[in-house]
Amino acid sequence: MLCQRCNNKEATVHLTKIVNGEKNEVFLCEECARETGQLPFAGNDPFSFQNLLSGILNPEINSYNTGIKQGDKCGTCGLSYYDFTQNGLFGCADCYETFNDRLNPLLKRIHGETVHNGKVPQRKGGHLRKKRQIKELRDEMQDAVKNENFEKAAEIRDKIKELEDNDGGE
């Protein structure tokens, strides 16, 4: 489809506006969309992916206040944490170690966990489900011991032992 404004170039921007219940569709080429201001993603858009990513990585900093420490750099590739917050890409595998103290709270906030568990198939994977259940029970047992609820901790210990003893069949 050709651009409805210039009738020369291929329309790559499809805009749908609904005003007072009336639907209006416009098909424009990228150049005409920019000229008419219909393409807000060019330039310094506060809703751009980079600004969104930067806001997630540094909630205390927005695009108008770049008070991030410039000194944090990866010793291998030289990428700074600020550069990472701007483009969302690490320069090398060592960046994960270098910026680990900032990544773990971020991953916890986004995913609710810092370790990837994945999904376990229903029919196959009984061993993995049992392993996960044992881990959860051990965590629960540690909490019981910490709270000096030793009877509950002993019950949980027995459940763990029973699960481990039954693990040989799979």
Image (cartoon, rainbow, N blue to C red):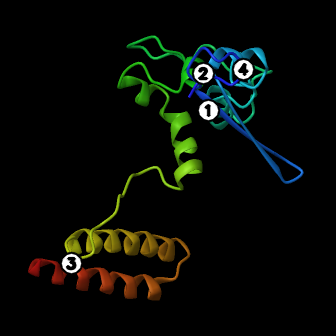
Q: Which corner quadrant holds the N terminus?
A: top right
* Pointer 3 local density, CA inside 10 Å: few below 14, some 14–19, many at least 20: few
Q: Nearer the viewer, residue 126 or 43?
A: 43
Tag 3 residue: 164
Secondary-structure class at tag 1: helix
User: Which tag is nearer the camera, tag 3 or tag 2?
Assistant: 2
Of 58 and 40, nearer the camera is 40
Circle nearer the N terminus (4, 3): 4
Where does the image place residue 62, in percent across and percent down from the top left?
76, 28
The vertical placement of 74 against 143, above or below, is: above
Q: Amino acid at mark 2?
A: Gln
Q: Earlier in the sequence, mark 4 or mark 2?
A: 4
Q: Residues within 10 Å of mark 4 (few under 14, many from 20)?
A: some
Give me the C-alpha separation between circle 1 and circle 2.
7 Å
- Tell me the SS state at disc 4: loop
Task: Residue 53: give its label.
Answer: 1
Q: Is residue 84 left or right of residue 169?
A: right
In the rendering, at what x and y percent does residue 40 appear?
Answer: 74, 25
Residue 86: which numbered mark, if any?
A: 2
Res 48 quadrant in image: top right
The residue indicated by pointer 4 is 5
Residue type, mark 4 in image: Arg
Say if mark 3 contacts mark 2, CB within 8 Å.
no
Would residue 57 be found to the left or right of residue 130 on screen?
A: right
Look at discs 4 and 3 and give the one toward the viewer.
4
- Nearer the observer: mark 4 or 1; the answer is 4
Mark nearest the camera among 4 and 2 is 4
Measured along the vertical axis of the image, is residue 110 above or below residue 169? above
Tag 1: Cα neighbours inside 10 Å, few (<14), some, or many (≥20)?
some
In percent of the image, x 52 and y 71: which residue is there? 146
Q: Residue furthest right?
A: 20
